[in-house]
Image (tube, rainbow, N blue to C red):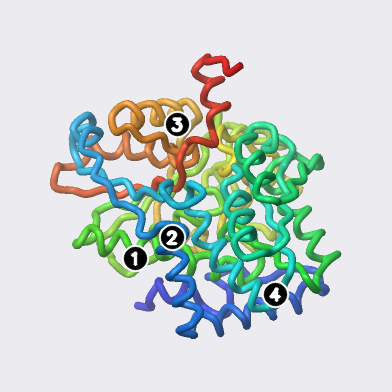
Amino acid sequence: MKSLKRYVLNKTGHFGPYGGRYIPELLIPIMEELEAAFYKAVKEKSFKSELANLYRNYSGRPTPLYYCENLTKRLGGARIYLKNEGLNHTGAHKINHCLGQALLARRLGKKRVIAETGAGQHGLATATVCAKLGLACTVYMGAKDYVRQRPNVFWMERLGAKVIPVKTGGQILRDAINEALRDLITNPADTHYLLGTVCGPHPYPVMNAYFQSIVGREVRKQLKTPPDYLVACVGGGSNAIGLFHDFLDDKNVKMIGVEAGGKGIKENDKKCEHAARFETGKPGVVEGFKSYFLQNKDGQIKETHSISAGLDYSGVGPQLAYLKDIGRIKTSYSKDTEVLKAYELLAKTEGIFAALESCHAVAEVIKLAPKLPKSKVIVFNCSGRGDKDLFIVAEKFNFKIS
């Protein structure tokens, strides 16, 4: 059997029928240049050493693998461990690929970096590494997310980034991605597009999976023996593939990707009250790659909904689409109401405020753990901390912030 670890990082950028590079001709030289720079850099000791130094001394890796003793006792059943990516500098796993891509941008002589962001964690991480490396930074953010993630907008602007609210379409993550691609077409020479997940045209899915794979490698070292289950939320999929990657060839390790169930997965032909692509989506080509997308009968992308801005996206990474199709990973979804209950339970049992995105994984763990014997081990990725969700959560819990 072929190694899935190697296959999801292959140089063709195709994973079964998914992935690829479906972009305007003007962008092809840019992607080819980036692809060549990436594959060259990851073979060089100097690049890997500089990145490892930044991980260790700037972002604060390795992040802890924490035994949730109180939550385990509360739920009964399997032992629960939390990989605390929220303790990274900037508060999420996003800085893992931001540091890697920013180093590549500097190698390529780029002076300006652009990015898209939903929850704001990727935008914040991008703005942070640009400040560190002396690069100009512009972040596109759906106007809806610009309002509901105000803390991160504030921090990005303090770091010197220009944050542009996108008022077209559904005013969410996919619209920010479209605007960033338009910017790149307009400014191809001096600009690097620091795409924030394992989506987009090749080499982005492979490149970001590579940079995020440090999460799973650390888990393997920290836990000593492989876990029985890995659980992660899935928006584009960077934190999930980061946790899963090192264990893809471990046949006994089960993996669950948890999507945004929103208000429920019933839908009409125009919009969804969720972002569960694997439940009701179908394959299509959007924003430069082929994967599962939420589409209407005419193939147009539907509006989505999630309490978490980072999962409010109509597509999913092509590697995860392939892994789902071959049965290597299972998928589930958590509704907004379940997510809020999970947020509160984790806080009250372990004193940890997780991002609403991560709380989709917590909600799945709450369902799963009591069904398993105490000998089993679950590791879930707490992909970010909950500071950024203050205003959303306060409103949901009827707390007025003056």
Q: Which residue is mark 4?
A: 31
Mark 4 and mark 3: Cα distance apart in space? 37 Å
Q: Residue furthest left?
A: 375
Q: Quadrant of the C terminus?
A: top right
Q: Residue at x 66, y 76 (%)?
A: 34
Specify which label sits upstream in the sequence, 4 or 3: 4
Q: Position of residue 400 (x, y in %)?
A: 57, 15
Question: Residue 217 has which mark?
Answer: 1
**Mark toward the start of the polypeptide (4 vs 1):** 4
Q: From what the image shows, is residue 108 above or below residue 146? A: below
Question: Residue 49 lies in what quarter of the image?
Answer: bottom left
Name the disc covering residue 242, or none.
Answer: 2
Give, as a three-letter code, the residue at label 1.
Arg
The amino acid type, in three-letter code, at marker 2 is: Gly
**Dot 1 alpha-carbon crowd within 10 angstroms: few under 14, some 14 to 19, many 20 or more:** some
Image quadrant in which you'd find residue 165: top right
Query: At 63% from the left edge and 58% from the top edge, which residue is drawn?
Result: 131
Q: Residue furthest right?
A: 186
Per the image, label 4 sits on a secondary structure element best described as: helix
Residue type pointed to by label 4? Met
> Disc 4 versus disc 1: distance between alpha carbons?
28 Å
The reply to whether residue 292 is visible in this rendering is: no
Label 3 near label 1: C-beta < 8 Å?
no
Going from N to C along the chain, the mark reached first, 2 or 3, is 2
State the mark number for residue 339.
3
Q: Quick one: label 2, few (<14), some, or many (20+) residues within 10 Å?
A: many
* SS under mark 1: helix
Mark closer to the chain start, 2 or 4: 4
